[in-house]
Image (cartoon, rainbow, N blue to C red):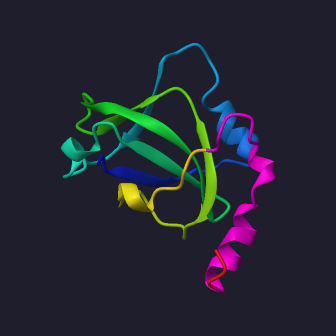
Amino acid sequence: MPLHMTKIAYRAQSLRDLESRFAGPSPERRLRTRYLPKRHEEMKGGSLYWIYDRAMVARSAILGFEERPDGHWDIVLENRLHMVHPKAKRAHQGWRYLADEDAPKDLVEGEVAGDVLPGKLVSELSKLGLV
C-alpha cells in the first residue's frame, strides 16, 4: 500500500480556486518543498491530499520527486485533481504523511462534491464522534 501526504491548499479562496490551479494542458504540476521526504520511496503510487476548510477534499497523484538547482525539491504531481469524500483534518504547516487506510475515498463517477457534507460540518461532526 502506498504512503500519501497531506498539505494545506494555501491561499485557495474556494474549492473552485483549488481546481483552477490544476487547469491547463501541462501533464504535471510542481510543488516546491525544502526537503525531500525521508519516506519518498514509499510514496510511489501515492497521492497528495489537499486540505481546504478543515477537511481533506481532493487529491493529486504523486509522480515523483526532483531536486531543484537551488537545493530544494519539487513534488511532481499529476495535473489532475480527484475529488474525495471530505474528511476532517486539522491545519498544519508543510506536509504530513498519511497512511493508505486513513485516506478518504474518491467520489464515484457522477457524484458531486456538493452531494457530500461541507468541510466545516464534517469537522464538527467528527468532534462529536458522528462521522
Q: Is residue 121 magenta?
A: yes
Which image quadrant for residue 53? bottom right
Q: Residue 59, image x and y in percent?
A: 53, 43
- Nearest the eye: 131 or 34: 131
- Nearest the eye: 66 or 60: 60
Q: Residue at x 37, y 54 (%)?
A: 100
Residue 57 visible in the displayed image: yes
Image side of residue 30 versus residue 13, left or right: left
Which image quadrant for residue 51? bottom right
The residue stretch that appears in magenta: 107-128
Residue 96 visible in the displayed image: no
Q: Residue at x 54, y 70 (%)?
A: 90
Q: Residue 123, image x and y in percent?
A: 66, 73
Image side of residue 14 versus residue 5, left or right: right
Q: Residue at x 68, y 34 (%)?
A: 109
Classify the position of the C terminus by image quarter. Answer: bottom right
Q: Residue 16, image x and y in percent?
A: 75, 40
- Nearest the eye: 79 or 102: 102
